[in-house]
Amino acid sequence: MPRIQSIHWKEFEKFLFKVGCEFKREKGDHRIYWKEGIKRPLVIPRDTSLPAFIILNNLRVLGISREEYLKFISEI
């Protein structure tokens, strides 16, 4: 199974928009996204690159597997 690498937050934001999330608000340096059917909002810090654990936690909330995520990222 391939490892998930850290990526720039703007690239992850493109992924979120592609899977149907919408930007709700920003508080400090954190951006909040929402999608119908998820239990809690997705919180993305505006650092230069997102560590793998933040990506994995948000994938778990979305219910998306690693393979699906890597497929989406390769298309962006």
Image (cartoon, rainbow, N blue to C red):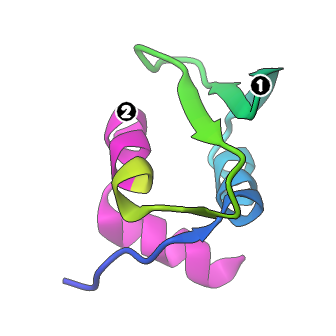
Residue in the image at 34% along x and 40% along y: 63
Res. 24 image quadrant:
top right
Foreground of the two, 25 or 69 = 25
- Using the rendered image of the protein, determine whether residue 45 is visible from the camera's viewpoint: yes
Q: Nearer the viewer, mark 1 or mark 2?
A: 1
Side of 42 where 9 appears, left or right: right
Q: Position of residue 25 (x, y in %)?
A: 80, 19
> Residue tagged by mark 2?
61
Q: Characterize the magenta stretch by its predominant secondary structure.
A: helix
Q: Position of residue 49 (x, y in %)?
A: 62, 65
Magenta stretch: residue 67 in it? yes
Which amino acid, by three-letter code, is at mark 2? Val
Q: How would you rate the neighbour count of disc 2 (Cα within 10 Å): few for under 14, some for 14-19, many for 20 or more?
A: few
What SS does tag 1 mark?
A: loop
Foreground of the two, 35 or 11 = 11
What SS does tag 2 mark?
A: helix
Residue in the image at 74% along x and 46% along y: 17
Q: Which residues are magenta?
A: 56-76
> Residue tagged by mark 1?
28
Q: How would you rate the neighbour count of disc 1 (Cα within 10 Å): few for under 14, some for 14-19, many for 20 or more?
A: few
Q: Position of residue 57 (x, y in %)?
A: 34, 43
Residue in the image at 77% along x and 25% along y: 28
Quadrant including the C terminus: bottom right
Which amino acid, by three-letter code, is at mark 1? Gly
Q: Sequence order check: which comes first, mark 1 or mark 2? A: 1
Q: Is residue 40 above or below residue 55?
A: above
Side of 65 where 7 appears, left or right: right
Foreground of the two, 34 or 5 = 5
